[in-house]
Image (tube, rainbow, N blue to C red):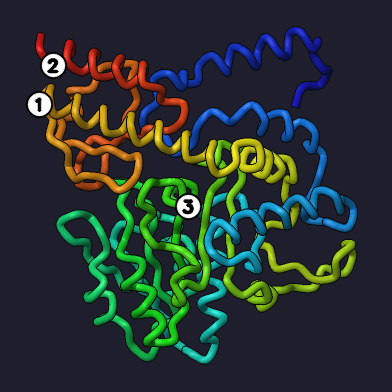
Amino acid sequence: MLNKGIREEELFAFLAEKKSADIDHDYILSSMCTIPHSVAVRAHCMFMETNLGDPGLFPGTFSLEQLLVKRLGTLYGCPDAGGYATSGGTESNIQALRLARASRSDVAEPNVIVPESAHFSFKKACDMLGLTVRPVALDLNFRMDAEMAAGLIDKNTVGMVGIAGTTEYGMVDPIARLAAIASQHDLFFHVDAAFGGLVIPFLDDPIPFDFSLPGVTTIAVDPHKMGMSTIPCGGLITRDPELLNTLNVDTPYLTVKQAYTLAGTRPGAPVVGALAVLDYLGVEGMKAVVAGCMKNTQRLIAGMETIGFARAVTPDLNVATFACPKVAVPAPWRVSWTRKNHLRTVCMPHVHADRVEAFLLAMQEHNTR
């Protein structure tokens, strides 16, 4: 720490210099986060000092968190759902597996059924909770093999996970079939819809993934992804509004005497930002955003195939992957690569049609020299 403070102008000149080293979103095609919507930014600034970890001090902010849960529960076919705003998919997935473990506390050597496409947060969760992962292979379209999942269930299985919008390929697992399997085995079933949770409901032909399926127990969703909230804002939504109380710990010196959240201090600002975007856009606005992202994804796929890079799979959501060597991508464009070495792009709301065309032109010029 500096012995003596510096002038504000000097400080912000230093910060601006560092900020300028960040990659411009105009060239970012790899991220599942995006530039926040202007109403999210405005709402965030109004609630910057609020702490949902001590909700009795901020009852207005807490009521907005409850309203966000209500909005998401209704969107997912369960208006009376419970839940809370997390820091993102990692926390939501950890909490879901904590709940799954608690549902079968009598099991000495618990395991969970998880697809090979699962986000790396499940590895963290299982390490922390002492759960053995039973990985399920994917089919030719990079979706979880439901019948293989069923065959892995035994007396020590405490839960199963399905993905509604895989991070690498944008695919939706056969959630309806998995939910039926979970119901048959009276098994805790968590759907990781961190990405797809604010895409699928707004598609022209939504894929079943939510509480309309009786076997779904919990859903993870990240408003700071396709919900265009400020970072960080995730959500864990539960069919049973009382379910999270099984994780309660005593908090004697706070305005609430028990809490089930993983984090203690929880910022209210991005939570209000998430609600602001959903209420500002409504279903019609969100459908328009999703339709634009899907249109850009389809254009990107068509353009890349014209250049000579075949799609790895036809995605369910706005993620596009290709058989393409790493040397084929020119600077300053930023893409990423799957574990199977497919070029991966995500057409988020900041990836406008002109950016897709600019990327395709750069790829064509770079690969036809």
Q: Which residue is mark 3?
A: 197
For marks 3 and 1, the one nearer the N-term is 3
On-image quarter of the N terminus: top right
Q: Quadrant of residue 345?
A: top left
Residue type at numbered disc 1: Gly
Tag shown at residue 367:
2
Work out how far the residue at label 2 is from the one at label 3, CA to CA, in angstroms. 36 Å
Residue type at numbered disc 3: Gly
Tag shown at residue 172:
none
Residue type at numbered disc 2: Asn
For marks 1 and 2, the one nearer the N-term is 1
Q: Give the x, y percent position of residue 235.
A: 59, 55
Q: Give the x, y percent position of residue 95.
A: 57, 66
Work out how far the residue at label 3 is from the one at label 1, CA to CA, in angstroms. 32 Å
Instruction: Tell me whether the residue at label 1 lies in contact with that at label 2, contact meaning CB atoms closer than 8 angstroms.
Output: yes
Crowd around label 2: few <14 · some 14–19 · many ≥20 (10 Å):
some
Q: Give the x, y percent position of residue 196.
A: 43, 50
What residue is rendered at 12% in x and 35% in y?
310
200 vs 81: above or below: above
Q: Nearer the viewer, residue 81 or 220?
A: 81
Residue 64 falls left or right of residue 354? right
Work out how far the residue at label 1 is from the one at label 2, CA to CA, in angstroms. 10 Å
